[in-house]
Amino acid sequence: MQHWTRAPLPHISARMKTPVHVIGGGLAGSEAAWQLARAGVPVVLHEMRPVQGTDAHHTDGLAELVCSNSFRSDDPNASAVGVLHEEMRRLGSLILRCGDAARVPAGSALAVDRDDFSARVTAAIEAEPLIEIRRECVEGLPPAEWGQTIIATGPLTAAPLAEAIRAETGEDALAFFDAIAPIVHRESIDMETAWFQSRYDKGDGKDYINCPMDEAQYGVFIDALMTGEKTVFKEWEANTPYFEGCMPIEVMAERGPQTLRFGPMKPVGLTNPRTGKKAYAVVQLRQDNASGTLWNMVGFQTKLRHAEQVRIFRSIPGLENAEFARLGGLHRNTFIKSPVLLDGSLRLKSEPRIRFAGQITGCEGYIESAAVGLMAGRFAAADAHGTAPNLPPRTTALGALLAHITGEAVAETYQPMNVNFGLFPPFDERVAKKSRKAAYAERALADLDRWIADKAD
């Protein structure tokens, strides 16, 4: 059973009339709008789809997931993102509430049926009387008469708005490519070759489908990845770096023939029940929808051309007759140099009526994006009520992520970052390495609870 509590919000003496504008209906924008409305602040949520689409989105639903369907580890005792999940639950996160409701099996991870998840977020936002949704593209910085505004347009910010941001900040927006993994129809997977098993039998032990390779098959596969025809970049894209956390499979292969065996194709923790032996390499697929009809190729983001993907991925044992619901692809990401541009409550230093939230700030990951949206919404609500934003403790996952984005990261080398225990402040006393993660988690949640209680007084 999930731990759901509602953190106290600013006192509402009367319904406010001046709305806060939120640009972008992704995870960050939806969460920011929700937090504002929960605080009694009216919101105008601007979402450009379906008026204007993107290379990655396929629907006009709010909080559409365009890459993986996984929110990663849900274990608050062993992972920083699991701690972030729990903190957001305790703060009444809409994204976590809908994620829990749309959950599909994924071992110790929180994965969701992406269509169900988006539908739940959209329905909640549409039903909230304090939120007005406007389907329109905002093509420049928000006008002064809008007052407080949160820009949460994500990594696919429309070009006119991106240019306006660059003009305002005087900083070049950094950019990288984000690659999308293919999705396979379950009925087309050969389960006489593949088998169900989670690594080390976590979860119920059957949350992943495993396709084994012997050494010869692995060698042929690596050669095919290296020689397969790739997407040709435009001249202006040629020097754009990849984000390490979403590296295309063939780019990883170029780093050395064994790289994938120590990455997404590592065979550790898995034993083929038919042979009783470990495979030389394993391709894993994770359930992608509630009905279990679609399965995502874990770690198989790619820039291979579509015909090459079908040819090469059908060489994987168990996927010889694979039918693909979606093939992999690439899209270009942009983010601002937040450590020098934003203050401690995510306001643009040169124009404090504007806040930024989500991946455009340089956080990486669905949950991190939503978390920054949650904080931006709460900070904007405090401003609307005439009180100072109350920042989360530095020892929490929220506080650690916020501190990194707003100043502790090295600006010159700033790159997208997932939440991790390396962002948390160290302990004053020595803590044994094997106990450190649990200690970070225990401290974070205890400090968050004290922070929530202090706000209630």
Image (spheres, rainbow, N blue to C red):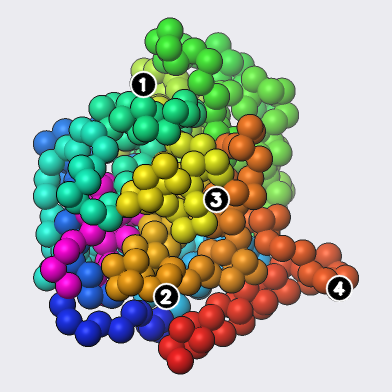
Q: Which residues are magenta?
A: 16-38
To which residue does mark 2 refer?
A: 91
Which of disc 1 and disc 2 is earlier in sequence?
2
Q: Residue at x 19, y 38 (%)?
A: 138
> Is any part of residue 437 visible from this angle?
yes
Is there CB contact under 8 Å for labels 2 and 1? no
Image spot of residue 223 (x, y percent): 61, 16
Q: Relative to residue 9, is residue 372 depicted above or below?
A: above
Q: Residues within 10 Å of mark 2 (few under 14, many from 20)?
A: many
Which of disc 3 and disc 4 is earlier in sequence?
3
Q: CA distance from mark 3 to mark 1?
A: 39 Å
Residue type indicated by callout 3:
Thr
Which of disc 4 and disc 2 is earlier in sequence?
2
Residue type indicated by callout 4:
Glu
Numbered disc 4: secondary structure: loop
Q: Relative to residue 366, is residue 51 depicted above or below?
A: above
Q: Nearer the viewer, residue 234 or 117?
A: 234
Q: CA distance from mark 2 to mark 4?
A: 29 Å
Is there CB contact under 8 Å for labels 4 and 3? no
To which residue does mark 1 refer?
A: 306
Q: CA distance from mark 1 to mark 4?
A: 54 Å
Q: Is residue 26 magenta?
A: yes
Which of disc 4 and disc 1 is earlier in sequence?
1
Numbered disc 3: secondary structure: helix
Which of disc 3 and disc 2 is earlier in sequence?
2
Q: CA distance from mark 4 to mark 3?
A: 27 Å
Q: Residues within 10 Å of mark 3 (few under 14, many from 20)?
A: many
Numbered disc 1: secondary structure: helix
Q: Outermost residue toward the top?
A: 235
